[in-house]
Image: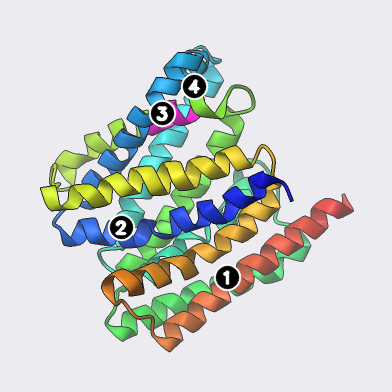
Amino acid sequence: MKKEYLLVPVGVAGVSISGPLVKWALACGASPVTIACLRLLLATLVLLVPALRTGALREMLHSSRRQLTLAVAAAALLALHFASWMTSLSRTSTFASVALVCTQPLFVAALSGVALKEPIKREAVPGALTAVVGAIGIGVFSAGSGGGDTVGDLLALAGAAFMAGHWLCGRAARRTGSALGYMTFVYGLTSFFLALMMPFTGGFTAPAASLPAIALLALVCTLGGQALFTYALGFVSADVVSFALLGEPVGAAIWAYLLFGEQVTAPLLAGGAVVLIGLAWYMLGEMRAARRT
């Protein structure tokens, strides 16, 4: 086994604690947009030194106008993703929010069909429909359980849609150049866009008690999770990473229980299980269709 495969479970563990850490910062009085802005700003500052030393950021800044435009769009969509998803965590359970935001592959398929004229593969349709049914179930069950509301669930789905757009723009923007230069540029610009949102979302709110959680979000979740996946994709197939990420809602639920005693009701757990089964079915269908062609 390649040693790079070991990065995948480490990355899943890193991103899985993201939801509970956001809940911690929210409980300390920080606003969702402030949390996201500081998280991306700190991650940018950590990446900036190697990006400048290696010339990766300079290379990114000298990309074509089309690549830079796509990277700016990717940053704007990432800012909207974090703003909507982190706000959802203040209105619904960690498990429901993370399970719904993990439906982003379905939004990628939908956006690819509309923008790129790449319709969803026939083999993947049953899985996609199953995941949609599970998402509807989460909305119904969380609204009726008192542990969340429909608005929170819709915000999580919006976060999934924005992340799908971010990935599509990023995939096109990163046809050439290093991952380090791209991440430094996009993360920095994302924090700037989030700062622009602050006057319209309650201003800058980050009590001192919330800063440890925000620092952990940047170091563990962004750099120890998302950045690890970006590196691992150079050695590990995207299918392996995609399937591994299906464990994120499970990990988030475990962390939320250990840190806050947050429990998942049986109906909500069932809805989440249907979403994850549907996503796995969808990905298998996409893989079979790709092998056929």
Q: Is residue 185 magenta?
A: yes
Residue at screen point 31% across, 67% down: 151
Q: Say which label, 3 or 1, has the lower sequence index.
A: 3
Q: Magenta part of the protein: which range?
A: 182-187
Query: How many callouts does the rendering have?
Result: 4
50 in relation to 124, above or below: above
Residue that badge 2 annotates: 21
Q: Nearer the viewer, mark 4 or mark 3?
A: 3
Percent across and percent down for residue 22 are: 29, 57
Q: Say which label, 4 or 3, has the lower sequence index.
A: 3
CA–CA distance between discs 4 and 1?
35 Å
Crowd tier of the residue under label 3, counting other residues whose Cα lies within 10 Å: few below 14, some 14–19, many 20 or above:
many
Q: Which colour scheme appears in the figure?
A: rainbow
Say the numbered circle drawn on residue 224.
none
Dot 3 falls on a residue whose secondary structure is helix
Q: Nearer the viewer, mark 2 or mark 4?
A: 2
Q: Say which label, 3 or 2, has the lower sequence index.
A: 2
Dot 4 falls on a residue whose secondary structure is helix
CA–CA distance between discs 2 and 1?
22 Å
Dot 1 falls on a residue whose secondary structure is helix
- Magenta stretch: helix, strand or loop mostly: helix
129 in relation to 186, above or below: below
Residue at screen point 20% across, 47% down: 211
Q: Say which label, 2 or 1, has the lower sequence index.
A: 2
Residue that badge 3 annotates: 47
Q: Say which label, 4 or 1, has the lower sequence index.
A: 4
Residue at screen point 36% across, 30% down: 46
Residue that badge 1 annotates: 276
Q: Say which label, 2 or 4, has the lower sequence index.
A: 2
